[in-house]
Image (cartoon, rainbow, N blue to C red):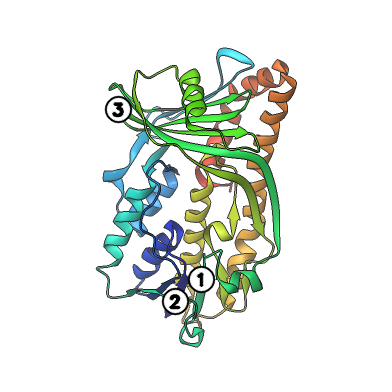
Amino acid sequence: MRVCILGAGLSSLTLAKALVNENIFVDLFTQKKITQIHKSRTLGISESNVDFFNNNIIDIKKILWKIKKIEVSTDNLKNENILNFQNKNNEIFSVIKNHELYDILKKKLNKKKFFKKTYVKKKLPNFKNYNLIINTDYSNPITKKFFSKLITKKYNSFAYTTLIHHEKVKNDIARQIFTKRGPIAFLPVSNNLTSVVYSLHNNLNENSENMKNLINKYNFNYKLTKIEKIDSFELNSLNLRSYYHQNILAFGDLLHRIHPLAGQGFNMTIRDIKILIDIIRSRIQLGLQLDRSINIEFQNTLRHKNLLFSNGIDFVHEFFNFERKTNNKFLSKSVQLLGKNPFINKIFMKVADKGSLF
């Protein structure tokens, strides 16, 4: 089997490595050379997805930072957590730097005989040579022609990301605070380094000095020594109405994009890779033809689940956005009460880990 991947981002390299591990030839084409991945960006990866990554893609244990507890609070209830998620025996998720994961995937792929990467200017490859074409690239003509029908939502917000350096602490608790201006997350990366993601309800880009002041305002746990360069990007959500056109399959952020408040965007992509690999393995074992029917089964398996999960994340965002606007302590207390129920708490954790209850 030979697969063509269009695009060279993190999702593309992760998928390419998973396919190469199945002894599938992968030709990756990109129209632009990625020289640098934002060093302020981090990813949260759920426990089940870490296991899948280590066993089926690449061993990432050495570049992970394990998180054993998540604390969620809100401006409406000062000095109180409304939710606590904890696994006493194991980590509940891990944090990894985008650029470190990208670099290790790139390095490992370059050593594989099943993988080839090509830079193209305008002309796309001859698709007749491939069983499957996977498109992750927003800018190529295929996206504009076949993957323009979207379910989209603009949040009128910007996400600001940075890394804060601080004095050494036992840094295994992630914290999310729903502030008056939007959610801010503190995600530990090491004993003296923490990633910050602040999603501000604002149409305008904030300057770096204002952002540093806001980070200091909500930093209750670290003695800061340095705040690195702050990056920003506009927030929106999207879901493709159709996942494929003939033997071309959309993938990664081109397929779905969600609000970063729960750190689930890349986890959705890893779950998509799991399903695609399972479909391909099953067909190879049964001696079936590898053709566009893979895309049909992929869409039928995942589209409703991904849309439901995306809507769930959007509901969480809108709930706390309403709580923020109305200054409603009753809503905060209601969530706090629900979170104290062990059964409901376990449901929240299972959905965050696996993407669904099933």
Question: Which residue does the image show at 58% across and 37% down from the upper left?
Answer: 205
The answer to whether residue 172 is above or below residue 1 is above
Q: Residue furthest right?
A: 326
Q: Count the marks: how many?
A: 3
First reached walking from the N terminus: tag 3 or tag 1: 1
User: Is residue 84 visible from the viewing direction of this image?
Assistant: yes
Q: Position of residue 211 (x, y in %)?
A: 50, 28
Question: Which residue does the image show at 43% across and 49% down from the upper left?
Answer: 49
Q: Are marks 2 and 1 in contact (CB under 8 Å)?
A: yes
Q: Is residue 212 left or right of residue 249?
A: left
Q: CA distance from mark 2 to mark 3?
A: 42 Å
Secondary structure beneath disc 1? strand
The image quarter containing residue 109 is bottom left
Secondary structure beneath disc 3? loop
**Foreground: 79 or 120?**
120
What crowding class fits label 2: few (fewer than 14 Cα within 10 Å), some (14-19), or many (20 or more)?
many
Q: Position of residue 166 (x, y in %)?
A: 32, 24
Question: Which residue does the image show at 35% across and 49% down from the upper left?
Answer: 99
Q: Which residue is mark 2?
A: 3
Q: Is residue 157 left or right of residue 60?
A: right
First reached walking from the N terminus: tag 2 or tag 1: 2
Q: Position of residue 151 (x, y in %)?
A: 71, 56
Q: Which residue is mark 3?
A: 192
Closer to the observer: label 2 or label 3?
3
The image quarter containing residue 28 is bottom left
Which amino acid does the dot numbered 3 rest on? Asn
Which amino acid does the dot numbered 1 rest on? Ile
Q: CA distance from mark 3 to mark 1?
A: 39 Å
The answer to whether residue 285 is above or below residue 325 is below
**Foreground: 127 or 139?**
139
Q: CA distance from mark 2 to mark 1?
A: 7 Å
Closer to the observer: label 3 or label 1?
3
